[in-house]
Image (cartoon, rainbow, N blue to C red):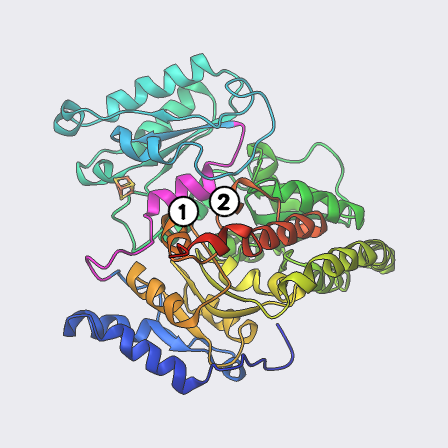
Amino acid sequence: MSDKIRKVEGITKESTETLIAETLAVYPEKAKKKRAPHLGANDPASGSACVKSNKKTVPGVMSARGCAYAGAKGVVWGPIRDMVHVSHGPVGCGWYSWGTRRNMMSGITGVTSFPMQFTSDFQEKDIVYGGDKKLKTLLEEAHDLFPLAKGISVLSECPVGLIGDDINSVAKQSAKDLDIPIIPCNCEGFRGVSQSLGHHISNDTIRDFIIGTREYAEPESPYDIALIGEYNIGGDAWSTKPLLEECGFNVKAVWTGDGELEKIAATHTVKLNVIHCYRSMNYMCKVMEEKYGIPWIELNFFGPTKIRNSLRQLAALFDDTIKAKVEAVIAKYDPIMQAVIDEYKPRLDGKKVMLLVGGLRPRHTIGAYEDLGMDCVGSGYEFAHTDDYDRTAPEMPDATVVYDDPSEYEFEKFADALKPDLVGSGIKEKYVFQKMGIPFRQMHSWDYSGPYHGYKGFEVFARDVDMAINSPTWKLVKAPF
Ligand code: SF4
């Protein structure tokens, strides 16, 4: 949280409210009434949400949202490397989500790690007669063909919940027969309003089927922690985990980037949970706190200012040995980070960025842009809740526009009016803004770059932002005649 209220020249509460009113004007009355509470001017002093959130999307407006299956399979379960994850239903969902989220994995593909597309490929007869028998056979075959897989998750797609299949009883019986964990996850895409309920459902399945079922082989230590809500996009976990280890912590498990089932299952014995993505995994942090008494802390590993604050907040919960190590780590990296800032800040100072991402990055990356001298003039989420917007208010400058589940039309209109120097969003937005002549960075996939987390990540982030904004391409968008 920043301590002083920042302002951006030319942006006032009135200018933002006028922009919102003009944008809403194109909608039919009913849609206008529904969308209005989801757009607002930020009020950092209030420290609370200026928009409504986590409501059903208005039909037909082109939302950027996905579904509960995407939240469960794509986000939470999919990155666990040593399990087979079955997309249970017709072929589409598993196919489109295959390899598109860059949660990197170590191991040997198909032998010890499984970044693959397993599906029950429902046909019409499976809809008519039910898919439970097919699932039972599939689980046997998966176990036979991939004997080193430590477990299997069954991620339901839409039809499974509609036709009344009982994946829970199939999973229970097959887990006994095959003697491996089989986790049924009722994350059909029609549940909830976005990816967000898929996170919650899959957290609940970790609670019901996984946590507390294993123990770590090595003895406990006072510095045992788990890194929660870190999905290793472009290697993010591989730059964060070593940093925490350099500070003296034993990172016993990462949830779930490059994750291992048995390490996740033994997390109930750690001393502290460090959560990065609050939206997707606060549920299990709260469960572990209530059930096992494990406290948790929310940290931010984007950009040197936030990393420094985060490491100090973390050290404050431990003894002098850790505090000294953390200070030594900060002293080691401060000059390296200053060199990065000295190189890139002169090229980016005063530039404006607009963001639209999922449930964490629209607030968590703002500090990293500010480290480079940039201002965030608009930000919003696909599927955040009120507690995320409460956390966003102090991070954004005064009166800047906040948008919840914006339609592509709204986002485009805001960018057209605010003329940002950079838009950071997803693949569905990228080419629209590039055609408008606005530099763009993908803030889900890191545009096939990364990592962006940790000190190592900031060097890559600064280079990428500079490369996007200062590319000579943008001078060539308009024909000279
Ligand atoms: S909404 Fe249903 S059909 Fe579409 S991707 Fe999600 S689970 Fe699959």
Q: Give the residue pinned by disc 1.
A: 427
What are the residue bounds of the magenta stretch? Answer: 58-82
Q: Amino acid at mark 2?
A: Ser
Q: Residue at x 41, y 18 (%)?
A: 142
Q: Are marks 1 and 2 in contact (CB under 8 Å)?
A: yes
User: Which SS does the magenta portion mostly show?
Assistant: loop
Label 1: few (<14), some or many (≥20) within 10 Å? some
Q: Give the residue pinned by disc 2.
A: 445
Residue closer to the observer: 8 or 248: 8
Q: Residue at x 57, y 57 (%)?
A: 289
The answer to whether residue 82 is above or below residue 412 is above
Q: Can residue 453 be seen in the rendering of this structure?
A: no
The answer to whether residue 467 is above or below residue 15 is above
Report ligand 1 position as a quadrant.
top left
Under circle 2, the secondary element is loop
Inter-mark Cα distance, 1 to 2? 8 Å
**Is residue 64 magenta-colored?**
yes
Most distant residue in the left direction: 128
